């Protein structure tokens, strides 16, 4: 499967994982920094949470991994949690800010 098609499927899957504190999925919230898809279907995701002390800092990356593993064509998943750069509200796309009433 072409990696760009697989990446789109992964993004769609990520849009089903929601941060429990903010009613927005992790992808549109800007918590996913990188999605790297290899030709063999292995996936490396670099993501963050809203704050290092976030109560779901352990749970959310595991949820992301579980959901991405269900995507057809994915052979392996590694999720890396980072706090560099730290997440802030500017990472939320404008259309999501509008939905949340942040404008």
Image (cartoon, rainbow, N blue to C red):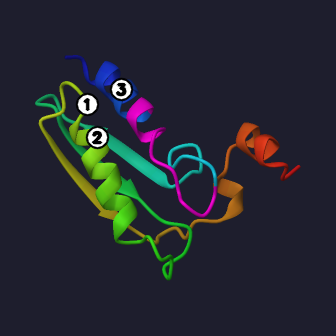
Quadrant in which residue 11 is drawn: top left
Badge 3: few (under 14), some or many (20 or more) residues near its Cα, within 10 Å? some
Q: Main secondary structure of the magenta part?
A: loop
Query: Of marks 2 and 3, which one's residue comes earlier in the chain?
Result: 3
- Which residue is tagged 3? 9
Q: What stretch is highlighted in magenta?
A: 12-22
Secondary structure of the residue carrying tag 3 is helix
Left or right for 35, reference 17: left
Element at label 2: helix
Q: Quadrant of residue 89?
A: bottom right
Please name the residue shown 81% across and 42% down the image: 98
Do callouts 2 and 1 mark residues in contact (Cβ within 8 Å)?
Answer: yes
Say which mark, if any, is on residue 68. 2
Give the labeled residue for mark 1. Answer: 71
Residue 75, given in percent of the width and then of the height, sits at 12, 36
Q: Are marks 3 and 1 in contact (CB under 8 Å)?
A: yes
């Amino acid at each position: 499967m072409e990696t760009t098609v697989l990446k789109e499927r992964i993004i769609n899957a990520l849009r089903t994982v929601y941060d429990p504190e903010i009613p927005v999925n992790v992808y549109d919230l800007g918590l996913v920094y990188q999605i790297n898809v290899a030709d063999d279907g292995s996936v490396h995701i670099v993501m963050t949470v809203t704050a290092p002390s976030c109560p779901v800092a352990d749970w959310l990356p595991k949820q992301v991994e579980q959901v991405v593993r269900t995507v057809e064509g994915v052979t392996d998943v590694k999720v890396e949690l980072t706090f560099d750069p730290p997440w802030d509200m500017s990472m939320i796309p404008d259309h999501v800010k509008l939905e949340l009433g942040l404008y």
